[in-house]
Image (cartoon, rainbow, N blue to C red):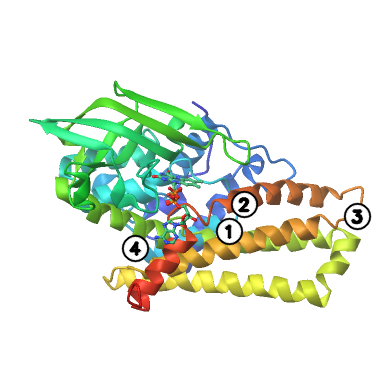
Amino acid sequence: MTVIETEPPVAATGDLSGEAYRVAMRRWLRANLPASFRSDSAAFSPPTLPQSIAWEAAMYRAGLAGIIWPQAYGGHGRTLREHLIANQEIGALAMPESVNSIGKELAGPIILAVGTEEQKRRFLPAILEMRDIWCQGFSEPEAGSDLAGLRTRATRSGDIWRINGQKIWTSGAYRAQRCLVLARTGPLEDRHRGLAMFAVRLDAKGVRVRPIKSIDGRESFCEVFFDDVEVLQSDALGAPDEGWAAAIRVLEIERATNRMYRAWRFENELRHLIAACKSDPVLAQLVAERHYEVRLGEVVVDIEVLKAHVETAVDALVNGDRIGARGSLAKLHWSEAHQRFAALTLELLAQASLPLQPAVQVARRRFEAIYLQARAETIYAGTTEIQLGIIADRILQLSKGK
Ligand SMILES: Cc1cc2nc3c(=O)[nH]c(=O)nc-3n(C[C@H](O)[C@H](O)[C@H](O)COP(=O)(O)OP(=O)(O)OC[C@H]3O[C@@H](n4cnc5c(N)ncnc54)[C@H](O)[C@@H]3O)c2cc1C
């Protein structure tokens, strides 16, 4: 395995708070993040899987993963506000996305909420130490937005469940050890009753993973087939009928707090764009024109609104409230705003003078990738139309069909 040499884990000492904690995180990240991992650097070269695993394990040892998880399960036992501070610092750098965000941000919180003591001790440290990478097996060919229509079936005989069915769009399944599978235990007509959640090993007999090529040329998501796959009761998460409630919690978390650094990364992207434009005489003049000044100003407003969404969600959670439908407001805004921004970056950079300045070349490479990835942002974690429906229903309480 690749070894990443890092400075001592200053942030894990536990006795730092507030600004001192922020400074320690910032210092550690800036001292240890390899230049080749930074997509705003000329030295950028996307990390391999072993490099990502080693880097994320180092981040964990430094106190930058499992921040709010209890120490008994390998976490750092800190507050949600400190989690936010760490994410602001992570977002400020052009770092690669986690290869285990499903483990750290979806499976982990679910296991903390509904898992047994034994499951918490078995699964959680393995996620943080990057021994187990997770993926999310919810969507199916006939069940995406209408998740309650899923058909993958789990039948129980004693202590053994048998799973049969197919998942699709399972991000990162080809590199994962475990899949968080939502499966049906009752009849299809029961819709969201009779759904259960399982931690399925992807090397189990009867599991087949087939990668799908996406628009950016990467094979990032997969089809996953389950053919009479045996899963022990000890890998069932929560009671059989708790699957839907647990899935809704996953989706709320996913929409509101998953990748909490998003707004700050967005700000990093905007700064990068402006710096690249200033390195080119034609672009420098363009961004100073009224038309682009206004559009870039709108991006700043979008970023500030996104930050406010995250900070409000953190306040709600700290006060013991659920995020509920407000997660849909945040999801709708970040995905739509980021897509608009991605289009603006390409529109601007296409007008650069030739030959391209080195800084413009770096920015073009980064923003072309962001543009393609942003196409999916209004689809995954619930499409724009689904978020609008939730806002109409649950926030505005507009009755259906009138
Ligand atoms: C990059 C990417 C990664 C993904 N990763 C994962 C993953 O790891 N795990 C996982 O389980 N899933 C994953 N997904 C799947 C994602 O959750 C689904 O694509 C999404 O829920 C939409 O479902 P669908 O594709 O079946 O489209 P459909 O639900 O068939 O929707 C098709 C269109 O109809 C619209 N529509 C549907 N229902 C309504 C309605 N009631 N009102 C108005 N409009 C409606 C939709 O908005 C959409 O425009 C990923 C998707 C993408 C793009």
Q: Earlier in the sequence, mark 3 or mark 1?
A: 1
Please tell me whether mark 4 sits on a helix, a strand or a loop.
loop
Please tell me whether mark 2 sits on a helix, a strand or a loop.
loop
Tell which of 36 and 222 is nearer to you.
Answer: 222
Q: Label 4: how many residues lie within 10 Å, few (<14), some (14-19) or many (20+)?
A: some
Task: Tell whether label 3 touches label 2 (CB within 8 Å).
Answer: no
Residue at the disc numbered 2: 94
Task: Tell whether label 1 touches label 3 (CB within 8 Å).
Answer: no
Looking at numbered disc 4 in the image, what kind of residue is underneath it? Thr
Residue 281 location, x and y as percent? 90, 62
Looking at numbered disc 2 in the image, what kind of residue is underneath it? Ala
Q: Earlier in the sequence, mark 4 or mark 3?
A: 4
Q: CA distance from mark 4 to mark 1?
A: 22 Å
Residue 128 location, x and y as percent? 37, 42
Residue 369 location, x and y as percent? 66, 46
- Residue 185 against residue 159 in the figure, above or below: below
Q: Earlier in the sequence, mark 1 or mark 2?
A: 2
Q: CA distance from mark 1 to mark 2?
A: 7 Å
Residue at the disc numbered 1: 265
Q: CA distance from mark 2 to mark 3?
A: 25 Å
Please tell me whether mark 3 sits on a helix, a strand or a loop.
loop
